[in-house]
Image: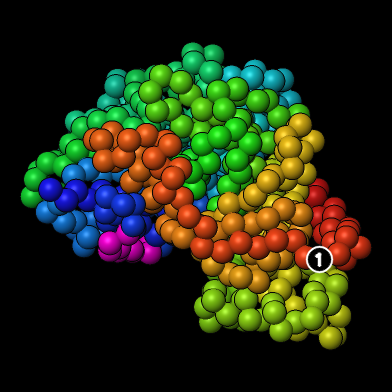
Amino acid sequence: MTRHILAIDQGTTSSRAILFGEKGRPITSSAQEFPQHYPQDGWVEHDPEDIWRDTVASVKAVLSEETAAIGITNQRETIVLWDRATGKPLHNAIVWQDRRTAETCRRLEADGHEPMIREKTGLLLDPYFSATKLAWLLDHVDGARAAAARGELAAGTIDSFLLWRLTGGAVHATDITNAGRTMLCDIHRGEWDDDLLALFGIDRSLLPEIVGNAEVYGETDPALFGRAIPITGMAGDQQAALIGQACFEPGMVKSTYGTGCFLLLNTGTEAVLSRNRLLTTPAYRIGADITYALEGSIFVAGAAIKWLRDKLGVIREAGETAAIAQAAPDNHGVYLVPAFVGLGAPHWEPDARGLITGMTLDTTADHIVRATLESIAFQTRDLVDAMRADGADDPQTLRIDGGMAQNDWFAQFLSDIVEAPVERPESHETTALGAAYLAGLSIGIWDGLDDLSARWEAAGRFAPVMNGDQRDGLLAGWQRALRKTLP
């Protein structure tokens, strides 16, 4: 009997469902964009009910009779607090991009807590992560702390919220890759940590059980889709992309260009602690052992292209940017630093804000478009340099995915700037594919990681062609622009 796997890909701007066949190829998909909410400068929220409604609608649109299991992948760090009895959120979800707890993080760092946090979690003190967001919800939603103390509330990242809703409240769990981004999990033990819970004032009863990435977690409520469907795979979006890109050997690197950019280097079973302000994060747990990765997180990548379209109106669609950049002979000395919600790795400056520098009366909108694309490659180079400084070998290949990976001009410029070959996979749905692979591994559709590796195919390869002097000049200009952004 033919078996299909349905992957839920719940992202920052849309909720999607993609149906995959046994060969790992997409059959059909459905996507729904949902509103972003910006209550104050630096604050970003989502309505969890929007996410839930759009997720269910997307699943119903692609579900087949042959669907054997569901995998979930999700935007990480975004946190939801809800009522256990009703399943209703008490507040909008606070999104990973949100910076409202920057002052809390500064105070905790000044009090000397970062070394302990770094050792246990592999993370830096930054409002990016979930712990301070959850503490903020408990402190600012009327009665939340008292209700939490009575065991009436549940909290979790988006994977956990969806799993709860899909199972009709029967399962409260999160996988190790999402748990590892909360700043509440000891990533070496794979468990919630008492010292961290006490530091952030989080009651353990709020939190889900931590599970692996390829397990049978439960079944969907039959009332949702007409029958119970096993949910058997779950991972945060960047780890799911690592799996979809088959980066299973230590030293393999992938970079995803979605709303943000996230570069992960597989370090095997060793949790390497970065000396250059990268993150140490669980990559996946399939079976007993945790595989780890070094991660560089860039907060704004594709979101900058969306900004060009929706706020500046200089493009009508993202696909125009390749031709615009190609037509411009150079950037005309224009640099854009897209620090719209602060800077991520390796700078970690939540108060940095975006700027455009080097403009003259000859500057055109096309130069700004090109500078925007270039900025994302420059930020990736910063991450690669940090990994090199941590002792990693030069990447033999950078496997890229996400919407911007389809832009040939950007892929070539990226290869030139990072001085490494760039490969684009045949399947551009690598994040959803990773979730599908995990779900399929659990029920025996695929035989193991070697089987998945054998299925990976390159659809495009880009090798460096830029001369060294030109590259060095561009990077020097980028660093000058970057220094103007930093507080």
Q: How is the image coloured?
A: rainbow
Could you tell me which secondary element the residue under label 1 belongs to? loop
Q: Residue at x 27, y 63 (%)?
A: 28
Q: Residue 465 at what x, y percent from top left?
A: 78, 65
Label 1: how many residues lie within 10 Å, few (<14), some (14-19) or many (20+)?
some
Q: Is residue 28 magenta?
A: yes
Q: Residue 315 at what x, y percent from top left?
A: 58, 80
From which residue to which does the magenta span run?
A: 26-34
Q: Nearer the viewer, residue 158 or 370?
A: 370
Name the residue tied to disc 1.
466
Q: Residue 272 at what x, y percent from top left?
A: 65, 25
Q: How many marks?
A: 1
Q: Nearer the viewer, residue 26 or 228?
A: 26
Is residue 353 something one can see in this rendering? Answer: no
Q: Residue at x 72, y 53 (%)?
A: 420
Is residue 362 something one can see in this rendering? Answer: yes
Q: Which SS type dominates the magenta stretch?
A: strand
Q: Is residue 360 magenta?
A: no
Quarter assignment of residue 372: bottom right
Q: Nearer the viewer, residue 271 or 361?
A: 271
Q: Residue at x 33, y 64 (%)?
A: 32
Amino acid type for the residue under numbered disc 1 = Met
